[in-house]
Amino acid sequence: MTHGFLRVAAATPPCTVGDCPANAAEIVSLASEAASAGASLVVFPELAVTGYTCGDLFAQEVLQASALAAVRRIASGTAELQATIVVGFPLSLGNSRYNCAAVICGGKILAAVPKTHVPNYGEFYELRHFSPAPKESFDIPPGILAPYAVPFGTDLLFADEYLPELAFAVEICEDLWVPDPPSSRHVQAGALVIANLSASNEVIGKAEYRRSLVVSQSGRGLCAYAYADAGGGESTTDMVFAGHDMIAENGSMLAESPLFSEGLILADVDTERLLQERRRVNTFASRPAYRRIPCSLSAPAGPSAGSAPGETLLRPVSRLPFVPSGAHDLELRCEEVFAIQAAGLAKRLSHTGSRAAVLGLSGGLDSTLALLVTVRAFDLLRLDRAGILAVTMPGFGTTKKTRGNALALAEALGASIEEIRIHKAVSQHFADIGHDPSSLDVTYENSQARERTQILMDKANQKGGLVIGTGDLSELALGWATYNGDHMSMYAVNASVPKTLVRHLVGYCAARPESFIAETDPGNPAAPAQKRFSRVLTSILETPVSPELLPPEKGEIAQKTEHIVGPYELHDFFLYHSLRWGSGPARVFRLASRAFEGEYGSAEIIRWLRVFYRRFFSQQFKRSCLPDGPKVGSVTLSPRSDWRMPSDASAAAWLAEIDELETRQTGR
C-alpha cells in the first residue's frame, strides 16, 4: 500500500446452490485472482459458501457440516495470499443458527460476524432459518469452526497489524437497509472500510435504490463501502440475483459491476483521505469499545501482481477537481456558484445602503465574471444597472482587443463606462520615486496595479458605492496579486472561485445571453444584441490570461501568466489536493501524474509543484488581510473562514519532500 491507497475487491463467484466444495473452489480461485491484481481486501456475497437460496436445506446437518469444511478449505486455499478474505456462510451455535461472514487471513479464520437484522417480509423469510446476532460477543470454542477459539460478534474491528488505523468492519445485506445500520457504529469505532456481504434480489427499480444506499452510507460514514452481491448462480425458484457489486467512497462511486454479471471489481480506496476528513469534521464521534483483531491489509502486492497499487491507481482522478465532468452537473454547479456570488454581493450592497458599484474592467476573465455577478446582484435588488461603473484603465500593456472587449461588454450589459488612462499618472509616479521606466521590473508592474486600485477606491467614494474585487482563488493561492493593488477591494466576489472554474462560469453566461440581455424584439430569438454579448464573452474566453502590465509585442499580449507561474489547471489541482485533503507533495505528484498522464511529464509536474509550494508559503501575508468575499466551495483561503496559516511558516519540509521526489524520479 502506497500513499494510503488500499486496493479492495468485491467479488461475485459462480455459485452452485448447496454444493459447498464447488463453491469453495470458485471462491479460492476468485480470491487468488483478486490478490494477483493487488487487492488487500476481498469481499464475497452473503452465504456464498452454500448459496443464499438453500431454503430449508439450511436445517440439514449435511449442509452445515459441508459449509464448515468449505470455510476451512477456503482458509487453507488462500493461506499464501497477501489478502484478507470475507465470505458468507451459515453457522450453527448452541440453540441458534446464524447467517455469518467469515474473516480469513493467512490461512486462519480470524472471526465470524453474524447478521444483525434478519428480514422476514415480502420474498424474505430468513427468520425461518436464522437468528439475529446476539447482543454480546463471545469466542466460539475450539473444534467447532477451527482448532482454536474464534471471536464471534458484531463489535469486531479488523485492523492492520502494522498500521492500526487501517481497519474495516462487516455488516450483512439487510443491515444496510435499516434506519440505524451497524456500519454507523462501525465507523465510529474506527472502521475506514465497511464490507457488506449481500444477496439482494433484483426487481424493477431496486438497483438504483441499492446504489443510493451504498453511496450515501459511504458519505455519512466518511468511509469506503464494498458491497458484494449474490449472482446468477442462485436458484431462480422465486427470485433472480444480478451480482450488483459496488465500491463507494465518501459519497462517490469508485467501481460498479454491470447487472447480471460475475467476477471482480477493484478499486483503490483512499484511506489517508478518509482519515483526514474524519479529523477535520469534529462532529464525527468516536466509540473505541470494539474488539480489535489484527489482520493483513497494508502488505504490498505479491510478485504476480502486474498492477500493484504503488504503480497504477484504480480510481478516477479528475484533472479539474473544481469542475464537474458531466455537462448537466457542470451547468448546475455554475448556476449555484453564480447565485452564491450574486446573493453575497446583494446582501453587502443592501446592508451598506449602496446603490453604486465600481470595478476595474480589463477585458480578462476575472473582471468579466465580477461584472456579470454585479449585474445579477443589481437585478436581484431591482437597482438600475447604470449604477454599476465599469472603469477601463489602459496602461503600458493594454492591447486593443482587451480594451475593446471591456467596452463592448459594459455597453451590452447597460453598465456605466468610464475610461481613465493611467500612462501619465504612472510615469509621474516613476519620476517621483526615481524609477527608470525602461526597467520592466516588479516596480514597473505593481505601480500600475496600485494606480488602478487608487482610482477605483476614489471613484467609489465619488459614487458612494463599493469597489468590487475581481481576483480569484488561484491567484490568491499563488500570491499572483499586487499587495494593496488588485489584492484589495471592498467585496471580493471571486475570492473562492478557482481559475479553472472561472472560465466555465463565463462560458455558462455566454450560453445564456437571455439571462442578461433583453432584446428589442422578443419574438426574434436570433436578435443581434444577445449575439453580440455572447461573441464578446467568447472572445474574452479565447484571450490568454494576463495582467497586461508589460508592453505588448506587435499588438499582442506579451505577458502570459501561465508561462510565468505555470498552468492553472496544474496549480488548481495542487491546491485542491493539498488543502482539501492535506496531501503532501509526493502524494499530490502521484495523483497529478495519474490525472495528467500523457499531457505533462514528471519533470514538468515537479517543476510547477515546487513553484506552487514556494509561492503558497511565501505569499500567505497577502491572504491574512483579505477583504470579505463569499465562500462558494470546500476550498477557500479566507482567514476568517477555512484557512488560518501563519504568514511566516516555513516551506522547508514540503520542499524537501519535493527534492526527494525529484531524486527518485531522475535517479540523481
Image (cartoon, grey):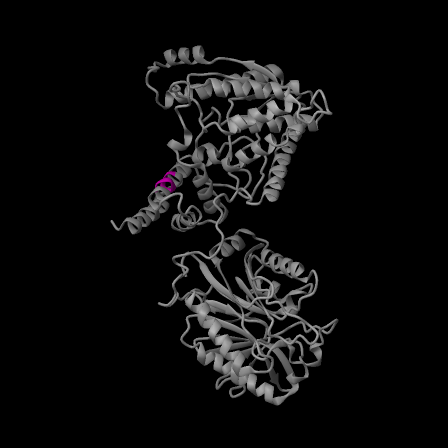
Image height of 475 relative to 33, above or below: above
Rendered residue at 59%/74% (across/down): 233
Name the quarter where the N terminus is drawn.
Answer: bottom left
Image height of 432 relative to 377, above or below: above
Outermost residue toward the right in this view: 122
Range of the magenta residues? 607-611
Where residue 615 appears, as percent x and y from the top left, is 39, 36
Left of 76 or right of it: where is 348?
right
Q: Main secondary structure of the magenta part?
A: helix
Where residue 531 appears, as percent x and y from the top left, is 61, 25
Which image quadrant for residue 628?
top right
Which image quadrant for residue 247?
bottom right
Q: What count of labels does the image hold?
A: 0
Left of 661 or right of it: where is 28?
right
The answer to whether one can see residue 661 in this image is yes
Rendered residue at 68%/72% (across/down): 239
Where residue 243 appears, as percent x and y from the top left, is 59, 67
Image height of 38 relative to 15, above or below: above
Tell whether position 299 is magenta.
Answer: no
Image height of 41 relative to 588, above or below: below
Tell whether position 610 is magenta.
Answer: yes
The answer to whether one can see residue 250 in this image is no
> Which of these two is toward me, 441 or 165?
441
Which image quadrant for residue 504?
top right
Where residue 436 appears, as percent x and y from the top left, is 33, 15
